[in-house]
Amino acid sequence: MGCVFRREIAKRLSRVLAISEDELVGLIAAVPVKKGRPKADFHLPVQELLERDIIASKAEPKAIVENISRQVRSDGNICVTSAPGSAWLEFTIRRPLLAQIVLQRVSTDGACYGVSHGLLHNHISQKVVVEFSSPNIAKKFHAGHVRSTIIGNFLANLHELLGDDVIRTNYFGDWGLQFGLLGAAFQRFGSKEELEKNPLQHLFEVYVRINAATEREPSLMEDAHTFSASLEMGEPSALALWEHFRALSLENYSQLYKRLGVRFDEYDGESQYRNAVHEVVSRLRDQGLLQISEQGTGVVDISPSQDMSSYATVTRSDGSSLYLTRDLAAAIDRMQRHRFDRMYYVTDHSQELHFQQVFLTLQRMGHSWANRCQHVPFGRVLGMKTRCGDVVFLEDVLDEARIRALHSMASTDTTKVMEDPEETAEHLGLAAIIVHDFHGDIRRNYQFDWDRVLQRRGDTGVYLQYTHARLCSLEREQETQASNNFDPECLHEMPAIQLIQHLMSYDEALHKAWMELQPRSLVQYLLQLSRLVSVVHKQLPVKGSPSQVAQARTFLLCSARNVLACGLNLLGIRPVDRM
Ligand code: ARG
């Protein structure tokens, strides 16, 4: 949002430095708000100007700062306020002007605040496919799928906010040998009633049983191959069973996604490509790219020097296709259907090599658009356990989070007047999980700890929700609606200025999230926003203040609530009004 100011500062600087405004604008950043006195609003490190050869000087950075500061135009609205001896050029906006412009933007831009007039305002809309969640029907939904679901949802939300045309794709693991194993397992250990009652649980149980049993009874593995082969050949009874599993799982997952507030535009799946893989393989053969290894598998050389130092396996020795082959077919199909500018695959980092192989094979096939595909890897979640032990079902995680949140809410008075405490608990639990997960670098593994996740204080989702609910309650208590007809002169105290400065830098948090394809900058931003709000709550009361002051403070807090709500929604968290 600080764009108006950044632009004006760039304009003034450009006159002195004799380079274009455009080049300068991206280097000017909001000063991060920290404890203590209000600092300048924008700054620019001189080092950056030297490194980019924007200025050439042998002088010390602080001397350069002094020199430039002396020459840049200062006036009542924007003042150069670089500290003596500092290596940063600093600029301060006239306080009432800052308050006026920032708060009015929050109010008029609404859900687009931070984009419309921010660093990303000239983002060119693109067609973006985000493939995420992608559980396996024949295996358990593990913590990694929870992560993929929330990270993918965030990426899709972010791109939608930027105005991109986003396709949310869920790519079910519903084909291949693992499915043969599941089919064989069901034929051996399955029960129709159990399957109807709790399909995912039951399928998982029979899957675990057969995995344990194959050690004692290797012939079971043959059954799995047989089942898999009959599926590949389209044998009706095998197909019917598979269809049934798939439909039940899909229904179950849809309910879970609804609970999460996550939607998909398409349910794709490996099975969709069971025929298309043949085309891929024959194309590879025609192109002379397919080689048969000593073991009889079909491989493609993807090494840079074409010496087979790295290769991708596309067929088994019996000629059947693999996970990778289906991914090739799926990518080609999606390109044909969507003509995407960008496609993300959100999975844990154990699949890094797999995606490298997919993209390189596509390149070798002549699909230059392969460079529009990107794997977004994340680390593993350690220790996410529920009542069922180590096994993680999304449903159990959500239930556990809700129960725990409900338990901690039971102590507060508002719970009694709440219409639907269960629903609030659900949103609290989910916020807790998401914020905990997004708090650091998503590429790192992290330790899951229920007690830490749900703390009311500290860097948690519960704290963010609590702040939102508290701001809502303040709005409810007001007789008059907060209006943008406020007197900005009333917001001159340090806590108010700091909150305004922070609101102004929302676009930088969004920009960073977009650059990094990571939510952490946004999470950090919202946590800091909540801390600043709490200082304002404490030090600048609304109740008992003269009406003009009360009105301005209310408007400030409403603006904070709006930005907090936007950020939470973007993270995939539904903000609660009471808790
Ligand atoms: N179903 C896979 C798994 O759970 C993830 C699928 C990722 N996407 C893909 N196009 N391969 O491991």
Image (tube, grey):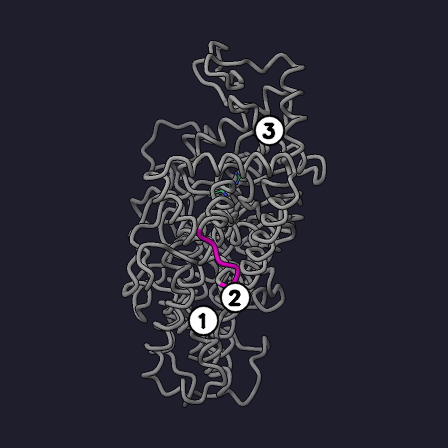
Q: Quadrant of residue 87?
A: top left
Mark 1: C-beta under 8 Å from nearest atom of ligand 1: no
Element class at badge 1:
helix
Pointers 1 and 3 in contact (C-beta within 8 Å): no
Element class at badge 3:
helix
The magenta segment is: 189-193
Percent across and percent down for residue 79 are 46, 55
Mark 2: C-beta under 8 Å from nearest atom of ligand 1: no
Q: Earlier in the sequence, mark 2 or mark 3?
A: 2
| Label number found at residue 370 | 3
Rounded to the nearest angstrom, the CA distance separating label 1 from label 3 is 40 Å
Q: Specify the amino acid type for callout 1.
A: Glu
Element class at badge 2:
helix
Q: Specify the amino acid type for callout 3.
A: Ala
191 in magenta: yes
Percent across and percent down for residue 282 are 66, 20
Percent across and percent down for residue 149 are 49, 53
Choose between 80 and 130: the one closer to the eye. 130
Q: Which residue is mark 1?
A: 426
| Label number found at residue 293 | none
Where is 539 relative to 33, above or below?
Answer: below
Tell me if I can see residue 181 in this picture.
Answer: yes
Where is 361 relative to 574, above or below?
Answer: above
Choose between 240 and 173: the one closer to the eye. 240
Q: Which residue is mark 2?
A: 259
